[in-house]
Image (cartoon, rainbow, N blue to C red):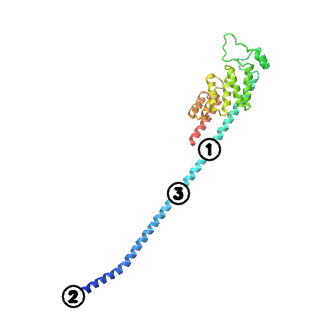
Amino acid sequence: MKSALAKRFSARLGMAGAFASAMLVVAPAFAQNSRLSLADRVSRLEQQAQAQNQGGTSLVNQVQQLQSQVQQLQGQVEELQHTIGQLEEKNKAQYIDLDSRLGRLEGNGAGTNSTPAGNAPASAGSAAATATPGTAAQTPPAAPASGSSAPAAAPDANAQAAYDTAFQALRGGDYAQASRGFRSFIQKYPDNTLTPNAWYWLGESYYVTMNYPVALEAFQRLLSQFPQSEKASDALLKVGYSQLELKQTDAGKATLQQVTSKYPNSRAASLAQERLRRLQLQSAIR
């Protein structure tokens, strides 16, 4: 009995020893395989992280390039806007200078005996034109012939002197005095042959001082009261300019187009077309 138990115990000890021996052989290999697998995983993670970093760096570089391009475009737009602004100011100054020159010629002609055709005064009126202001005030203008209906009275000495005084103030840059002089002239001589011009230069005296609402009103009054005036095309052009300055862009464009269609061969039409081209260019770069 004891011998049998001893044999069983011995057999179990042998099996345990064999298992332990097997474990001693397998355990190092398993541990080595585990270490290799972990190292592979770490290596893969490092590779993935490196790839992500490279992708992130590339994205950052692309963003920086786009920002640089946007800054360059903004700089170009600002340069174009500055150039356009300078051109607008230059054209405005040229137009004002041209108006001043035309007005100077007009004033020089008005200061002589060159009165409008068909409205030349009689000899008594000519004498009044060369007399002193006090004497001229006592000499009435020549009456029109019986049955004739002149659209406007010829300028007498007082009217001519008042107009010349206001125009001289405009030429000298005293726009406040000029506006007062032209308003006074219009009130005293509403139907004079010089009244349309007085309305125009009144509007000009306000336009050059950037008082665009009052300038617009003066130019519109000229067009409504004297649509056949020689100043009508220039007045309509200045209506469009004033509307643009008042940010009434659609109305200003429509008015400039009306200038080109109504007065196609005039200086005002050329200026209107040029302003429309600049407006189109400004819209394209915005």
Residue 248 image point, x, y percent: 57, 33
Please identify the quarter of the rendering in which residue 212 is found: top right
Picture layout, residue 233 above or below residue 42: above
Distance (Cα) linking label 1 and label 3: 30 Å
Q: Tag 3's secondary structure?
A: helix
**Image position of 16 (left or right of 34):** left
* Among numbered discs 2 and 3, the one appearing first in the sequence: 2
Frontmost residue, 20 versus 93 = 20
Q: Identify the element where label 1 is drawn.
A: helix
**Quadrant of the frame with the N terminus:** bottom left
Q: Nearer the viewer, mark 1 or mark 3?
A: 3
Q: Nearer the viewer, mark 2 or mark 3?
A: 2
* Image quadrant assignment for residue 77: top right
Please determine whether, in this image, residue 145 is positioned above or below residue 275. above
Q: Which mark is residue 43?
A: none
Rendered image: mark on residue 4: 2
Q: Pointer 1 and pointer 2: residues touching (CB < 8 Å)?
A: no
Q: Earlier in the sequence, mark 1 or mark 3?
A: 3
Quadrant containing the C terminus is top right
Residue indicated by mark 3: 60
* Percent position of residue 204, x then y: 67, 30
Q: Residues within 10 Å of mark 2 (few under 14, many from 20)?
A: few
Q: Residue furthest left?
A: 1
Q: Residue at x 72, y 26 (%)?
A: 166
- For the residue carrying disc 3, how many other residues have a C-alpha within 10 Å: few (<14), some (14-19), or many (20+)? few
Residue 159 percent across, percent down from the top left? 72, 21
Q: Which residue corresponds to mark 1?
A: 80
Q: CA distance from mark 2 to mark 3?
A: 82 Å
Name the amino acid, label 3.
Val
- Residue nearer the viewer, 165 or 104: 165
Q: CA distance from mark 1 to mark 2?
A: 112 Å
Report helix, strand or loop for mark 2. Answer: helix
